[in-house]
């Protein structure tokens, strides 16, 4: 089968990256600019074509780029649909497969466009004030539905304020910002303009968008059309105190012609991602209950419209259903995470599961988080993102039981590189014997007769998971001669609800530290680790765990702490996640449970810390505000512990969102660890 190589493109990105790179068969930081991956593969209804996003980096602008490509399943041909200086996303096939609607900034702002395949023509469909989400075709191919946020306007209080007029030519201070909403900030977006997400429809041939939903509520997708194109189903919490309810939403249907709204579900928790069966008699959806705990499995459920009966299809699967598609005879193809991998499986209405593949992966480049996505044609052909420990996502096709990987878009940059090898590791925690799964990466040209320094890397969440997936950050550490170990410690997802809740009320603690410490001891016992050169690193929840760990032990030469929480009292009262986090992660309000919050805080152990610590956080981080890092930095300075604070200008919580920031994180960490090698 013909493989598509990035080298065929001869793009300026690759040329620029090569110009800066020193010849090497090991992964260099500048190589990160040349990496790319497949995302959002959308297969045509007849299963013959796939439109997908090729996500890459532009070394000149230090930003991500997204182009649209078309793959012909029958001829094995790839064609660039839109691969230029603009960005493209959300490509969606018309029901008859003759058109592709997509979003792009090619007209100056993010707007909807239409591409006609046979005619090879493109048209601008909208001139909207805001970008759209949840794009969806009507089954008759005549309309497009989407959601878009509309500003609320000035509050009564703001309207009541009487300010003097500014004299002509006067230079006054910027006007004040008035905040009066419970949900007033979001990481990566800053302070939020009060607005409400509404559902719209638009003629597929272009015209004026028409608003279907009203009211001061958030109407969210994905959106699902009734087979006769008369109604749309969406998710919304329309309780008067919806702002304070982070675990609630119900399914609603809106009549496209009249705007009449009907509530379809009223379960405790969230119901979302609804899709109609072909006969229109039932609706599948994802359901998540509202327990006051930090982790709950999301289940696949079905609503029979005539009777109103709701059944939980995946009730016997102790894993979260992240995505699904209707399959033949009313069964499903579902996506779920299991033991550090993302799987596709067939699921019957009775809940019986038969795995199809566990190779969905590769849509994150920095660290080895579980990732991946899929779509399915009417005839059962599946397009998905295929990745592994050595490569980011390529395009995969599953048909008639055969699994083909049809691109090789990183061979130009990785084909001649020696990467670290990823090995599985299973240990029993020193704390209680709990089985913990993990992996370790050995450096290129590894020689087990030698001794290597070790980096313990801790994932975020904590209710997320790492796995045997490509990770440029960890591969860079391996390229510099480190063995890297990472585990899915208690609290991680993909091991079931009980395992995820082992950290309920205990994050951070001696328990999760024991899981990590056991892995370090297990690597040392293998005989190729230099026990005098142990290092620890982690970001977000991993940063919390790292800061907590060095308050419990001095066995590590140095620590790299990225975007941590240091003081839970100040964190929950300054960060964007306070509404849900206090409810689900803590026994109550901080002023009523001060001892609990303090015990979970790395700051409570700071008097024990002697480990040199590098702390790195984005200046615009609203998930773990930089004031948290500043507290730890100042506390360590007061104790004369060698410490550096690295502020990342303009960065939100996702530091690695721009390639230069990812590289800076990697290289500062390496330099800090080199400083403390014995």
Image: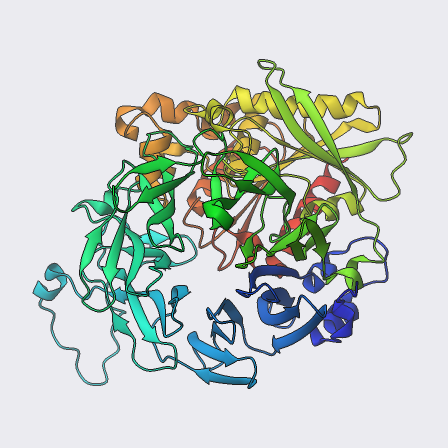
Colour setup of the view:
rainbow
Residue 558: quarter of image: top right
In the displayed structure, 279 sits above or below 593; it is below
| Residue 492 coordinates in the image, percent (x, y) | 53, 32
Residue farthest top in this picture: 432
On-image quarter of the C terminus: top right
- Residue 20 x/y as whole percent: 76, 68
Q: Is residue 307 visible?
A: yes
Q: Position of residue 512 (x, y in %)?
A: 55, 24
Image point (78%, 34%), residue name: 453
* Left or right side of 258 for 339: right
Left or right: 222 as drawn, with respect to 54: left
On the question of residue 194 being in view, the answer is: no
Q: Is residue 84 above or below residue 645?
A: below
Find residue 21 and report its image quarter.
bottom right
Which of 624 and 446 lies nearest the eye of the viewer? 446
- In the rendered image, residue 294, in percent from the top left (x then y), is placed at 40, 32
In this view, the residue in front, 155 or 468, is: 468
Quadrant into which the N terminus falls: bottom right
Q: Answer with the quarter of the image where residue 232 lies.
A: bottom left
Q: Count numbered badges in the picture.
A: 0
Which residue is drawn at the image coordinates 56% and 63% (left, top)?
43
Name the residue rendered at 26%, 73% in the picture: 210
Q: Is residue 626 above or below residue 17?
A: above
């Amino acid at each position: 089968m013909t493989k598509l190589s990035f080298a065929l493109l001869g793009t300026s990105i690759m040329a620029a990256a090569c110009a800066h790179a020193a010849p090497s068969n090991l992964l260099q930081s500048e190589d990160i600019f040349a990496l790319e991956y497949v995302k959002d593969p959308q297969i045509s209804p007849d299963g013959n074509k796939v439109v997908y996003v090729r996500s890459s980096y532009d070394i000149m602008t230090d930003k991500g780029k997204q182009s649209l490509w078309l793959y012909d399943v029958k001829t094995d041909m790839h064609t660039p649909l839109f691969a230029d200086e603009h960005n493209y996303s959300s490509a969606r096939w018309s029901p008859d497969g003759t058109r592709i609607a997509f979003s792009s900034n090619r007209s100056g702002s993010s707007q909807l466009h239409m591409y006609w395949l046979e005619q090879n023509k493109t048209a601008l469909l909208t001139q909207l004030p805001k970008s759209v989400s949840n794009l969806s075709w009507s089954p008759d191919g005549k309309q497009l539905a989407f959601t878009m946020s509309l500003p609320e306007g000035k509050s009564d209080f703001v309207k009541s304020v009487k300010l003097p007029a500014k004299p002509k030519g006067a230079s006054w201070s910027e006007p004040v910002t008035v905040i009066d909403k419970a949900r007033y900030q979001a990481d990566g977006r800053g302070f939020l303009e009060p607005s409400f997400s509404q559902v719209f429809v638009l003629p597929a041939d272009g015209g004026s968008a028409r608003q279907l939903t009203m009211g001061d509520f958030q109407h969210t997708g994905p959106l699902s059309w009734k087979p006769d194109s008369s109604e749309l189903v969406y998710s919304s919490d329309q309780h008067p105190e919806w702002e304070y309810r982070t675990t609630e939403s119900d399914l609603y249907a809106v009549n496209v012609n009249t705007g009449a709204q009907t509530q379809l579900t009223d379960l405790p928790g969230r119901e979302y991602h609804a899709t109609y069966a072909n006969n229109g008699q039932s609706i599948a959806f994802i359901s998540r209950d509202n327990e006051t705990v930090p982790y709950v499995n999301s289940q696949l459920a079905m609503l029979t419209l005539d009777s109103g009966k709701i059944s939980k299809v995946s009730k016997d699967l102790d894993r979260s259903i992240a995505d699904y598609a209707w399959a033949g005879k009313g069964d499903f193809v579902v996506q779920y995470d299991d033991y550090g991998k993302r799987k596709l499986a067939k699921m019957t209405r009775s809940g019986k599961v038969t795995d199809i593949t566990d190779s969905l992966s590769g849509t994150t480049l920095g660290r080895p988080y579980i990732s991946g996505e899929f779509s399915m044609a009417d005839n059962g052909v599946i397009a998905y993102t295929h990745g592994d420990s050595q490569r980011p996502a390529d395009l995969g096709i599953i048909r008639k039981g055969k699994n083909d990987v049809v691109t090789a878009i990183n061979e130009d940059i990785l084909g001649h590189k020696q990467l670290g090898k990823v090995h599985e590791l299973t240990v029993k925690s020193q704390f209680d014997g709990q089985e913990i799964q993990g992996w370790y990466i050995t450096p290129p040209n590894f020689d087990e007769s030698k001794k290597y320094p070790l980096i313990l890397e801790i994932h975020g969440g904590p209710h997320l998971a790492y796995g045997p997936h490509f990770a440029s950050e960890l591969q860079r550490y391996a390229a510099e001669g480190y063995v890297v170990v990472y585990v899915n410690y208690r609290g991680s997802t993909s091991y079931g609800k009980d395992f995820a809740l082992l950290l309920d009320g205990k994050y951070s603690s001696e328990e999760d530290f024991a899981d990590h410490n056991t892995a370090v001891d297990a690597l040392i016992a293998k005989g190729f680790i230099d026990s005098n050169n142990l290092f620890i690193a982690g970001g977000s929840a991993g940063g919390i765990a790292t800061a907590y760990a060095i308050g419990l032990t001095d066995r590590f030469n140095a620590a790299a702490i990225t975007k941590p929480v240091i003081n839970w009292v100040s964190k929950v009262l300054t960060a964007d996640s306070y509404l849900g986090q206090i409810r689900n992660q803590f026994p109550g309000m901080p002023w009523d449970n001060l001892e609990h919050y303090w015990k979970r805080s790395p700051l409570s152990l700071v008097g024990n810390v002697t480990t040199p610590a590098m702390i790195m956080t984005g200046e615009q981080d609203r998930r773990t505000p930089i004031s948290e890092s500043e507290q730890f930095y100042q506390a360590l300075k007061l104790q004369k512990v060698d410490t550096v604070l690295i502020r990342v200008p303009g960065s939100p919580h996702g530091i690695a969102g721009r390639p230069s920031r990812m590289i800076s994180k990697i290289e500062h960490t390496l330099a800090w660890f080199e400083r403390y090698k014995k």
